[in-house]
Image: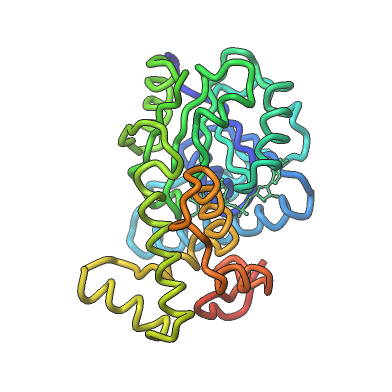
Amino acid sequence: MSRIERLGVIGAGVMGAGLAENAAAEGLEVVLVDISEEILKSCKTGIQQSLRFKGMFNKESGSSAASPPEEIIEKIRFTTDYAEISEVDFLVENATEKIEIKKEVYRCVGENLAATTVIAANTSCFSITRLGSLIPAPKRLLGIHFMNPVPMKKTVEMIRGHWTTEETISTAREFLAQLGKHGILVNDSPGFVSNRVLMLTINEAVLVLQDGVSTAEDVDEIFKSCFGHKMGPLETADLIGLDTILYSIEVLHESFADSKYRPAPLLKRMVDAGLLGRKSNSGFYNYGRKVN
Ligand SMILES: NC(=O)c1ccc[n+]([C@@H]2O[C@H](COP(=O)([O-])OP(=O)(O)OC[C@H]3O[C@@H](n4cnc5c(N)ncnc54)[C@H](O)[C@@H]3O)[C@@H](O)[C@H]2O)c1
C-alpha cells in the first residue's frame, strides 16, 4: 500500500494530542476531531508548548533533525466536524474510555469515513471485536494501543479483533513504520496483555495506599529501587489520567465479570474530586501550576 499522507485522529486528549504531534512531526497531514472548540484550543496550546520545548532541546544538542514548530503545527487541522475525516488514509480513535462515547464516535466515523479506510482503536481495555461491531466493516478495524507519551514511545501493542484481516494488520504496520514505531501483535481480549496486568497492579497499589500500608512515594520507590521499573504504579496512574484508569478497570470488571477488577474506592473518590493526575495538575502527586 502507498504511503499514508493524511491521518484522522479522533479525540484531542492526552493520547490524541500526542499522536497528532507525533504524526505531524513525521510529515503527515492530520485532521484532529474533538467535540468542543475549547478542548481543541487547549490541545493546540499543549502541542505548541511541547514542540517548542523539543525545539529548544534540539538546538542545545546541535540537532537540526526536526522541522520548526510552526511548520509542524500547520499540518494539524483542529476541527469539531466529522465530515473532515472523509478523505483521510488512516484513522486512529482516541476518545474517552466509555462505551456510550465510543458508540457515538463509531456512529459518526461510520457515517463519514471512506469505505476502504483502516481504523485503529487506541483503547485501553475494550475488546476490539466489541468496538468492531459498532461499524459496518469490522474487518477494517484493529487495536493499536499506543503508549504514553506517544512521541517518545516506539513500541505499541497491536490487537487482532475477530474479523480483522491480514491486510488491515499490514496497513497498520506500514503506518506505524512511518512514525518510526513497531507493534507487538496479540489476540483480542479485554485489556489485551498490557492493561489486563497493569490496571490490576495500579488498582491494587491504590488499595495499598487506601489501607495505610505505605505512602505513595514509598509504594513507587519499591517498584523503582527493588524491581528496576522506571516509574512506580501511582506515578504511572498520574501520567495516564485517573479517570482513564477508573474507566479502564470498570471495563475489565464488566467484561470479565470478575470481582478482582473491582475499582478501589479511593480511586473513585479521587476522580469524583477532580484529582485526575498530571492533566488536572494533581493526583497522587502535585505538578505545580497548570499551563493550559
Ligand atoms: N492516557 C493513556 O495513557 C492512554 C494510553 C493508551 C490508550 N489510552 C486510551 O486512549 C483513549 C483516550 O484516552 P486519553 O487519555 O487521551 O483520554 P482523555 O480523557 O485525555 O481524552 C479523551 C478525549 O475524547 C474526546 N471525546 C469525547 N467524546 C468525543 C466524541 N464524540 N468525538 C470526538 N472526541 C470525543 C474528549 O473531549 C477528550 O478530549 C481511551 O480509550 C484510553 O483508554 C489512554
Residue 187 x, y percent position in the rendering: 36, 31
For the point 63% across and 42% down, the residue is: 74
The image shows residue 93, relative to residue 272, as above or below, that is above
For the point 76% across and 26% down, the residue is: 83
For the point 46% across and 51% down, the residue is: 258
Residue 182 x, y percent position in the rendering: 32, 36
User: Going by the image, does 14 lie left or right of 42?
Assistant: left
For the point 60% across and 68% down, the residue is: 268
What colouring method underlies this structural image? rainbow
The image shows residue 68, relative to residue 121, as above or below, that is below
Residue 251 x, y percent position in the rendering: 55, 48
> Tag count in the figure?
0
Q: Quadrant of residue 136?
A: top right
- The residue closer to the viewer here, 230 or 29, is 230
User: Going by the image, does 195 lie left or right of 136?
Assistant: left
Residue 85 x, y percent position in the rendering: 68, 27
The image shows residue 40, relative to residue 179, as above or below, that is below
Quarter containing the N terminus: top left
- The residue closer to the viewer here, 176 or 226, is 226
Quarter containing the C terminus: bottom right
Q: Quadrant of residue 114?
A: top right
